[in-house]
Image (tube, rainbow, N blue to C red):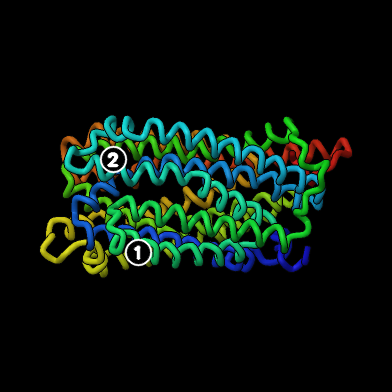
């Protein structure tokens, strides 16, 4: 392995390291959100408001399943970052091999279950009758693409655990451009409707994941797994699942609240669903920096824990929060000034109600972006430090918050209640995560002091 392909986050200025590591991730996330937006723009412009609503009606379910995939992959990579930080390359390869076995198993189980129960899910969510068939066509294709999602995210997470945040971005950019081309071809030329948008996303991600895998195998010699290292290790699989499942469940539990909120929104009609769809796509784009900062802190925390450098974690956290809050102000200004023009990307100018609702939704949500910054930064840092089970509790609180909004506010105040769902969830999550961070840091400090007193290695908490 060429040494300069990895990045050691245990030495140097935390602010510079966090910026340098997060910027490539940000570009990747932005491109990913770009092709999500393009999907929605093409659907809204070429297929109409009902088709736009059909795609939006599946959004929370897609987040539930795809979020679980992303979460377990990110969790699986945490032990790898610890091994890399500790300089244990043999252990790194063994963990990587066991990641492969687990990912294949999860891909099979998740695909079978979601495809079988796809229609039942849409019925339970009270999807409006005029859009349920299109929603099914879109969602079933996304579910068949779960193996592609797991492939890309697993390979990308492994590469990031070694400190390389740039390589996955290159292939994500490739995926973004390919997705746009396939979108236009499937929808306009082949007349595949909303299913065409879904299959464009699936195929582009599959190609990106395969290309990223080939690159990783060829360029990262440290990951050239020997024959004996391919043997499944139940202890390592247990450790990986102990990190990955809580992170995956955190996404899914959080998404359960989104599903409940989406179900409440569905009762408001396809116009409200279309507005939420467009606003959510824009909001996901505007929120990309928080995801990039979160992923950065997971690797930063993992490597520094692996190296036994707890003193650097607090400094890095403060620097990252400064970046997050500064950006939150910018995002709010963008929503206020450009909310209406952004809404016009998705619908015609005569859809005045949808346009007004999109702008209102964006302003309400970006007002809470400082809260979102804390959620992502602290949660991912705690996970990187090896305490991923705390993510489940934060996810439960988000689920409770969105459920309360869905049952108590949406029936009474309608669309305004839907807009308050995410900010309320972020308040609940922060109320838990902030004290949880101090508890985790104290627990790690005590553990390492105990290991020092007994002469044990402090570099590998696993």
Q: Residue at x 12, y 60 (%)?
A: 352
Q: Quadrant of residue 252?
A: top left
Q: Is residue 379 left or right of residue 269?
A: right
Dot 1 falls on a residue whose secondary structure is helix
Q: Quadrant of residue 440?
A: top right
Q: Is residue 122 above or below residue 459?
A: above
> Marks 1 and 2: which is nearer the front?
1
Q: Is residue 435 above or below residue 16?
A: above
Whether residue 61 is visible, yes or no, is yes
Whether residue 326 is visible, yes or no, is no
Work out whether mark 1 precedes mark 2 in sequence or the reverse, and give the earlier one: 1
Q: Is residue 174 left or right of residue 450?
A: left
Q: Residue at x 31, y 44 (%)?
A: 137
Which mark, residue 262?
Answer: 2
Residue 459 percent coordinates (x, y): 79, 46
Front-most of residues 220 and 444: 220
Residue linked to disc 1: 185
Mark 1 and mark 2: Cα distance apart in space: 30 Å
Residue 316 percent coordinates (x, y): 61, 58
Q: Quadrant of the N terminus?
A: bottom right
Furthest toward the right, the residue is: 455
């Amino acid at each position: 392995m060429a040494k300069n392909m990895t990045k050691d986050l245990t030495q140097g200025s935390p602010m510079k390291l966090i910026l340098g590591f997060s910027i490539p991730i940000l570009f990747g996330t932005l491109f990913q959100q770009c092709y999500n937006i393009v999907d929605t723009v093409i659907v809204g412009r070429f297929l109409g408001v009902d088709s736009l609503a059909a795609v939006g009606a599946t959004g929370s379910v897609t987040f539930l399943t795809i979020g679980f995939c992303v979460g377990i992959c990110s969790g699986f990579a945490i032990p790898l970052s610890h091994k890399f930080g500790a300089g244990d390359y043999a252990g790194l390869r063994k963990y990587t091999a066991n990641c492969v076995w687990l990912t294949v198993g999860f891909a099979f189980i998740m695909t079978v279950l979601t495809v079988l129960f796809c229609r039942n899910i849409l019925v339970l969510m009270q999807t409006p009758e005029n859009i349920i068939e299109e929603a099914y066509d879109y969602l079933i294709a996304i579910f068949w693409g779960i193996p592609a999602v797991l492939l890309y995210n697993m390979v990308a997470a492994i590469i990031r655990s070694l400190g390389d945040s740039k390589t996955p971005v290159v292939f994500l950019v490739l995926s973004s451009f390919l997705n746009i081309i396939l979108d236009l071809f499937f929808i306009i030329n082949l007349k595949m409707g909303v299913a065409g948008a879904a299959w464009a996303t699936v195929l582009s991600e599959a190609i990106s994941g395969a290309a990223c895998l080939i690159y990783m195998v060829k360029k990262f010699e440290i990951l050239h797994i020997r024959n004996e290292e391919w043997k499944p290790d139940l202890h390592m699989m247990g450790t990986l699942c102990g990190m990955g499942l809580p992170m995956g469940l955190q996404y899914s539990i959080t998404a359960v609240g989104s599903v409940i909120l989406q179900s409440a929104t569905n009762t408001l009609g396809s116009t409200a669903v279309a507005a939420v769809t467009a606003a959510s796509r824009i909001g996901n784009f505007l929120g990309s920096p928080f995801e990039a900062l979160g992923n950065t802190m997971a690797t930063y925390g993992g490597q520094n824990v692996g190296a036994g450098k707890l003193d650097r974690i607090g400094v890095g956290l403060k620097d990252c929060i400064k970046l997050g809050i500064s950006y939150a102000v910018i995002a709010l200004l963008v929503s206020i000034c450009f909310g209406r023009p952004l809404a016009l990307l998705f619908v015609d100018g005569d859809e005045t109600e949808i346009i007004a609702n999109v702008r209102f939704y964006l302003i309400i949500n970006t007002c809470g972006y400082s809260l979102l910054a804390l959620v992502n930064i602290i949660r991912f840092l705690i996970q990187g430090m090896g305490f991923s089970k705390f993510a489940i509790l934060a996810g439960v609180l988000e689920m409770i918050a969105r459920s309360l909004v869905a049952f108590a506010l949406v029936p009474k105040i309608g669309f305004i209640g839907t807009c308050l769902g995410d900010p309320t969830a972020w308040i609940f999550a922060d109320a838990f995560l902030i004290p949880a961070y101090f508890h985790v840091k104290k627990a790690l400090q005590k553990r390492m002091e105990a290991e020092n007193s007994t002469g044990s290695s402090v570099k590998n908490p696993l």
